[in-house]
Amino acid sequence: MSETKIDYESLGLKVGLEIHQQLDVGRKLFCKCPAILEEGESVSITRYLRPTRSELGDVDPAALFEWRRGRFYEYQSPIKSSCLVEADEEPPHGVNHDALAVAIAVAMTLNSHVFDEIHVMRKVVIDGSNTSGFQRTALIAVGGWLEVNGRRIPIETICLEEDAARKVGEEGAKVVYRLDRLGIPLIEIATAPVIGSPEEARDVALAIGRFLRLTGRVKRGLGTIRQDLNVSIRGGAKTEIKGVQRLELIPKVVHYEVLRQLNLLKVRDELKRRGLREEDITLDPVELTGLLRESKSRVLRRALDSGGVILGLKLPRMKGLLGFEVAPGKRFGSEIADYVRFWSGAGGLIHSDELPGYGISFEELQAIYKALRASPESDAFIIVADDRGRALKALASAVERVKAAFKGVPEETRAANEDGTTRYMRPRPGAARMYPETDIPPVNVTEDLLREAEKIKPEPLNVKLERLTLKHGLSRELALEALSDPRLDLIEKLIEKHHEKIPASVIASIFIVTLRGLKGKGVDVEAIPDERIEELAEAIARGVVAKEAAETILEEAAKNPEKSVDSIIETLGLKTVTEEEAIKIIDETIKANMEEVKAKGHKAAGLIMGRVMEKLRGKMDGRKVSELVKKRLEHHLHPSPEKR
Amino acid sequence: MEYFGYKGLLASMLRDVGVEPGDFIRITRGDGFTIEGVLMPRYSGGDEPIIVLKLRNGYNVGVRIRGGETIEKAGRVERGEPGAPVPLVEELEVGDKRVFVLGCGGTVASRVDYETGAVKPYLSPEELALSVPEMFKYTSIDVEQLFAVLSEDMKPWMWHKIVEGVARAISMGYDGVVVTHGTDTMSYTAAALSFAFHRGLPVPIAMTGSQRSSDRPSSDAAFNLVSATLVASKAPFAEVAVVMHGESGDTYALVHRGVRVRKMHSSRRDAFQSVNARPLARVWPREGRIEMLEEKFRVRGSELLQVDNGFDEKVALIKHFPGPISEVIDTLVDRGFHGIVVEGTGFGHVSSDAIDSIRRAVESGIPVVAATQTVFGRVNLNVYSTGRKMLEVGVIPVEDMLAEVAYVKLSWVLARTRDMGEVRSLMLSNLAGEISGRHDVKLYPRWDV
């Protein structure tokens, strides 16, 4: 893989983003359930989903495929956070009014055109993540823009939709989903495909995320925001990449996809150079079961022992192409394997460019070439070990995928892996299977609703910045950091609430210095509920605890999110001490170190301070302690006569 | 004049431009904002001057016309001709039994128009074979669409037609009959069939429907239909039954006797429950298994077909309520009703000030039947004085019969006799399992807390 710099512009890279952000409006989008994730008691429901038939008589091939292979779903319905609506046992209620107002506010702020009547649609999904078999979604607005790095990024659409159920397991043909997440309101913002570099893609995602947080009405934490990317280069194809959860991964995902498309184009060119045509790839499976019956290969053994067969398929003049790397660690062979796994349900395949290997001996390899009438010098082959039906389907899908390589890059929906590479998920949906949700009447966007949305519109960043610096006296640096902090709304709230007792910089530092420091140390700061931070600020304001104790308290709160700050202070003994108590401790320390005090005089202050702080850290403001230490030293060194 | 659901000025505007649903149109606002999409008919939303468009991305949106917009036709959407449905299985297995499916409403196989969202039901053997191939595993299928009527529009004269249709199929030698029906009034029709066939039924009649329409991937229609087909083709009993989901999941269905079943939930898949009786059987459609839950049943093949058809349309089912119930009874008598079933309170009571109205009804030859609005339990008019007064004036207390079943039965009885004595005697005889003498302690669903 060449690591030379890629000139994305000359490749015609075009990236579009779809940002899905959960809204924080208390309830779900189409029922009265609280929008929370819940691990508690749940009822289990087993369901199957059937392909539905269009007016023309056809069915979605991917849905049909899932159904044919007996896919079924176990839905865990938690009692508190899901109801009959999520269980698909009751029609949806009307659209959550607050969620709609937030979506409209977001659209207005992005200069988008809000429609006058909102129609909820059913978008057919096939993976079981919606109990109904479709996702409910409504287009709120089109058009508009967001400025990123001085460039206007056009917005295409803004939708309000329900989040899908949470996948919690998979076992053979069964997929397990939890219904707590199903129905949580999501806003989906799609940009035009105008982003020209991997870094810009990340910056736009970052900017949209930050912008959404400015509303103060979105959820935070892992899984509450998800990015889908669509990536294309000139001559390639539009690839949809689903579920990039971490922003930092975006540039890598885009980069790898560019490489993948470039390399698939190279595969196409090489096929042409070798004079191959689509017709040369034919489905002529050869039975290799007898030939490999004694093989030591574990992969083959496993299939044979469970009554399976081994089938081989010759790919003429394709030697070396299957082993060609298209993305880091991903060969053209892996592309075919991903495709085969999806469409046949087979575990995978073995191809000639990775042999000898998998415990298949050199002799066996030669025998396979011979049986397939293939030349080890120029031909390639694929073998599949599975039950006969699946193995045949696997080879048929492999042929399909290889034929597609003659055209270059197939249009696909892919899923992001943790390392930034992607895997085949399903074909890109053709004409969207979208039809009206007849259970929900269209919503008229009234003047009242628009006025309500107007009130939720987030303030522009510069207005916030001005308030934080001019009114609350934050440094510009700290204020800018605060603006990009995920808990900006809480920072603002606490600064307003405690401005008489705690300087704004102290509040801001809790987030920007303390929390980020803890995160750097590997503490799971996202686990700390807002409530704890509010309690901490309250405790500092009341003088119960010193601001120095913040780090210790928050670290504990991350470990025990259920524990109140008061009880954390109690258990860790962090309560502030009175001046008298402090003096007592200081006096004891001076007495215990009297010799050094006498020897060093006032210079002993540092030493005493250090010892005293071991006992008083977090219980009294450091400056105050220092002041008292000086006073008491003076007292001990030069006792005033009247006290004697 | 309305134009595809559009009203007033908007209707004439669209008509003037010469566009109709299915046309691509472009709306340009005064401020230059332009939007293109397929014009959709206006199904709902009232009189607001809003045009509904389906955009290229598939979404429908409403655009308000304030005046100052221009509307132009921008083309027409080419749509393919409906073709043969894609089969769900590659090879259809067909069992060796013969089942007749009589369509009386409710959607079973359907196609959804992704443009408009309209759902068209299809009920042909071909469409069933391609859409619900599992039901053929047990049997071959013949289909007749008798009528497609909304549940709430079902009338007693239609019961008569359904009985005829079922009887025809049985006499043609089918191994069983499946009747598809809207769920809201399915139990009424089930009771009607039960009385019409109580004299002699050689094969099972399995009624079924769906609580989630068949245009959605999560529809329960196929599951219920396969279960009902299994019952019709293989069940050891020859009874009129309702076969529907037994629980929320797609695991098993329950078979309820036609005179003992009631829709107990407005939306759940397992809405149907047996009342004052246990379900007859449990069915696993995937495994093809039928487990009997009741030991006593009419055995398949043990009776010859004997039909006793006909229902009286002028029967009322009313519910006691704290207001002036006597006025309702008086009105029914004055309007010439032939019989009245009253869902009384608890043991079957109506307020004592309605006794005179009931006396007047009975004296006018109109039987008054007492059932209970508690749904579960038995009517007893001997316990309190009001009840005894009701008995004195001639009320017929129908034991543990469901009120809806009492209504259907009275309709059936009145079509045979208007003689008060005979009506009483028939109402109190157990003809089709609608009355039972004893309820054991467990015969009542309870919270599992």
Image (spheres, rainbow, N blue to C red):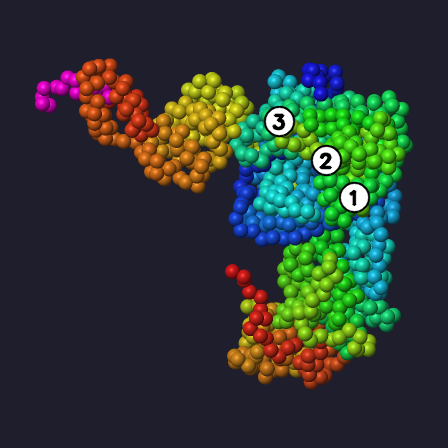
Magenta residue check for A290: no
Vertical side of B446 occupied by B215: above or below: above
Residue farthest toward the bottom in the current orientation of the protein: B421
Q: Earlier in the sequence, mark 2 or mark 1?
A: 1
Q: Secondary structure at mark 2?
A: loop
Q: Chain of mark 2?
A: A
Query: Which residue corresponds to the image point at 80% horizontal and 26% vertical from the top-left?
Result: A320
Query: Where's residue A16, x and y in %?
Result: 69, 26
Q: Mark number for residue A358?
A: 2
Residue designated by label 3 = A249
Is residue A205 in view? no
Q: Is residue A277 left or right of residue A333?
A: right
Magenta residue check for A635: yes
Q: Is residue B112 left or right of residue B387?
A: right
Residue designated by label 1 = A293
Vertical side of B394 occupied by A300: above or below: above
Query: A602 or A510, which is in the foreground?
Result: A602
Residue type at numbered disc 1: Arg
Query: Where's residue B169, x and y in %?
Result: 85, 68
Pointer 2 with pointer 1, Cβ within 8 A: no
Q: Chain of mark 1?
A: A
Query: A398 or A368, which is in the foreground?
Result: A368
Residue type at numbered disc 2: Tyr
In front: label 2 or label 1: 1
Q: Earlier in the sequence, mark 3 or mark 2?
A: 3
Residue type at numbered disc 3: Leu
Query: Which residue corresponds to the image point at 42% horizontal and 20% vertical from the top-left?
Result: A473
- On the same chain, marks 3 and 2? The answer is yes
For disc 3, the neighbor class at 10 Å (few under 14, some 14 to 19, many from 20) is some
Instruction: Give the distance between the C-alpha atoms of the residues marked 2 and 1, in whole angstroms.
Output: 15 Å
For disc 2, the neighbor class at 10 Å (few under 14, some 14 to 19, many from 20) is few
